[in-house]
Amino acid sequence: MSATANQAARQAFAPNWAARAGLVALALYAVYAMAQLDITWARLATGFGEAGRFLARMWPPNFARWELLVEGLLESIQIALLSSALGILLSLPLGLMAARNLSPAVLAMPTRAFVALCRSLHYVIVAILFVKAIGFGALAGVAALTIASMGFIAKLFAEAIEEISMKQVEAIRATGAGLGAVLLYGVLPQVASRFTGFCLYQLDSNLRNSTLVGIVGAGGIGGTLFAAFKRFDYDFVAAILLSIIALIFLAEVVSGRIRAAMR
């Protein structure tokens, strides 16, 4: 073996000292941050003990007030479905206008800025703003989750459009077709499956999020959950949490079936 080959063999797995130094610095900072935040083993041990007693008070779950439980779940489902539908409908034109391969920069840049604005704030903060603006209830939750859906789906839809093959689009344009025909036959067929996946994911996400916005007064099962916590009604809390988990699992099964049917 030549000297060059020996040198290459020796350097094949040469240590990356910069990466090692970075890991050491990260570990040291983690220790420093834990000290600043007063995260100690004693506090963790105390917390685990309190958690055990808290979980013991939640068992067995109490489903005696199932009417209140069902009412909250149905409201959360309605919030999720309505906000998803509105978000999807509004995201279609936004995604088309934000795609830089279809829209001029004078239109695409402001649209992308608006979509980024929709994603700038957490949906719970947006829900608080809508609760303050239009009052308590499901309308605030629908408005907050619609904004969140627009920010998510429009961004992914625009990125999917930017990855399409322009040959098909140019072929449709060469026939003298208008903008509507170009979008219908040249753009949408290339992104339809991905857009459907985005919509199903957002619906699944909104089902979870609709249970959280209720905590700040935006309707849904979250309000029932928060009220149960305030009453120290922990067995009913357990029943609510188990129902939410069952709802999410059911939504996952249904969305999986829909994805499988579309393949």
Image: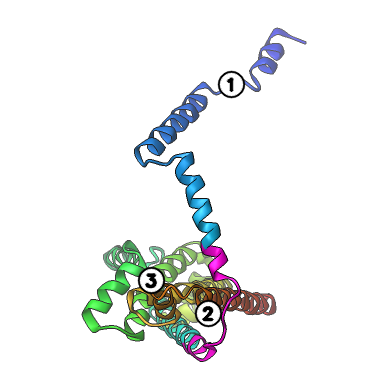
- Give the residue number, with chain letter if any, for mark 1: 15
| Residue 159, disc | none
- Image location of residue 227, percent across then percent down: 39, 78
Q: Amino acid at mark 2?
A: Tyr
| Residue 148, disc | 3
Asked if the residues shown at circle 3 and circle 1 are in contact, with their CB atoms under 8 angstroms apart, the answer is no
The magenta-colored residue range is: 54-71
Q: Is residue 138 above or below residue 102?
A: below
Distance CA(mark 2)–CA(mark 1): 54 Å
Q: Residue furthest top?
A: 3
- Image location of residue 176, percent across then percent down: 45, 80
Distance CA(mark 3)–CA(mark 1): 45 Å
**Going from the N terminus, do you reach mark 3 or mark 2 first?**
3
* Residue lying at 70% horizontally and 8% vertically, measured from the top left: 3
Q: Quadrant of the N terminus?
A: top right
Distance CA(mark 3)–CA(mark 2): 29 Å
As helix, strand or loop, the secondary structure at mark 3 comes to helix
Q: Is residue 167 magenta?
A: no
- Give the residue number, with chain letter if any, for mark 2: 185
Residue 101 visible in the shown view: yes
Task: Tell me the chief SS of the magenta region.
Answer: helix
Residue 171 visible in the shown view: no
